[in-house]
Image (cartoon, rainbow, N blue to C red):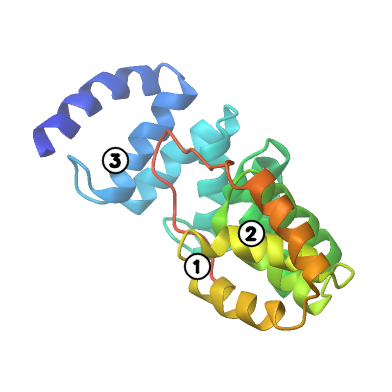
């Protein structure tokens, strides 16, 4: 396996040095994970940053996460927000999720639950399971959105089918208070959304932020 990564590095590195944003993200991924090279967060950050500045949305999201965690660079919440915003606006579900986490906590940006809910929804509609769970919980409690058992049931169900334990627990609590009409509506919505998935083909992701 290490030989495969070393061979990949030999292919990607010249392309990365020539300014190819996708190759730069892949090289960053190698250094972030120690695939065929020694782990070096600083080097990984450098390549991800070049890629991010070149428009690669996964790299933009990873740069945001590295700033948020102080990984390979000095921790900087405001810089994390800026990069997550770029990734989110470019349609990256991980960037949307992480931006929503910071907005929910008021980290590096003014706390704004309504805006957080909008970004969770954008990611949830793209099939991002943790965002589906967070969005469902917001509908269940009326945080950032109007309380809505049908929407809560929908998004918690979508998250629960992919093993999000907190969603399953919250779903059981919601279901006890729903009418048969509400459950029927929620199940119809669930059938409509259940085929959506979040395919991620590209350089590895930095772990999502806790929140």
Between 162 and 14, the one nearer to me in the picture? 162
Residue at x 67%, y 60% (from the top left corner): 155
Q: CA distance from mark 1 to mark 2?
A: 9 Å
Between 64 and 179, the one nearer to me in the picture? 179
Q: Is residue 157 left or right of residue 66?
A: right
Q: Is residue 191 left or right of residue 197?
A: right
Q: Quadrant of residue 181?
A: bottom right
Q: Position of residue 130 (x, y in %)?
A: 56, 61
Q: CA distance from mark 2 to mark 3?
A: 30 Å
**Do labels 1 and 2 touch, CB within 8 Å?**
yes
**Do labels 1 and 3 touch, CB within 8 Å?**
no
- The image shows residue 119, relative to residue 160, as above or below, that is above
Image depth: mark 1 or mark 3 in front: 1
Residue 110 visible in the current orientation: no
SS of the residue at dot 2? helix
Residue corresponding to mark 2: 132
Quadrant containing the C terminus in the rendered view? bottom right
For label 1, the crowd category at 10 Å Cα-Cα, with few meaning under 14, some 14 to 19 and many 20 or more, is some
Q: Is residue 104 left or right of residue 55?
A: right
Q: Position of residue 109 (x, y in %)?
A: 77, 65
Q: Quadrant of residue 115?
A: bottom right
Q: Is residue 132 left or right of residue 3?
A: right
Q: Position of residue 42 (x, y in %)?
A: 38, 50
- The image shows residue 23, relative to residue 165, as above or below, that is above
Residue at x 51%, y 39% (from the top left corner): 59
- The image shows residue 9, relative to residue 138, as above or below, that is above
SS of the residue at dot 3? helix
Between 2 and 148, the one nearer to me in the picture? 148
Residue corresponding to mark 1: 164
For label 3, the crowd category at 10 Å Cα-Cα, with few meaning under 14, some 14 to 19 and many 20 or more, is many
Residue corresponding to mark 3: 30
**How many circles with numbers are drawn on the protein?**
3
């Amino acid at each position: 396996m290490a030989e495969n990564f070393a061979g990949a590095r030999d292919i990607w590195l010249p392309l990365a040095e020539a300014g190819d944003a996708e190759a730069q993200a892949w090289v960053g991924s190698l250094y972030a994970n120690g695939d065929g090279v020694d782990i070096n967060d600083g080097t990984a950050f450098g390549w991800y940053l070049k890629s991010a500045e070149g428009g690669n949305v996964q790299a933009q999201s990873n740069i945001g996460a590295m700033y948020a965690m102080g990984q390979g660079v000095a921790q900087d919440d405001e810089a994390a927000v800026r990069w997550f915003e770029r990734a989110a606006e470019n349609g990256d579900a991980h960037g949307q999720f992480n931006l929503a986490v910071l907005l929910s906590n008021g980290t590096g940006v003014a706390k704004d639950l309504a805006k957080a809910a909008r970004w969770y929804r954008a990611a949830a509609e793209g099939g991002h399971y943790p965002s589906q769970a967070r969005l469902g919980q917001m509908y269940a409690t009326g945080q950032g959105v109007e309380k809505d058992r049908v929407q809560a049931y929908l998004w918690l169900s979508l998250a629960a089918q992919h093993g999000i334990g907190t969603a399953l627990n919250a779903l059981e609590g919601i279901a006890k208070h729903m009418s048969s009409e509400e459950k029927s509506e929620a199940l119809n919505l669930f059938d409509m959304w259940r085929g959506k998935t979040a395919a991620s083909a590209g350089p590895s992701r930095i772990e999502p932020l806790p929140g």
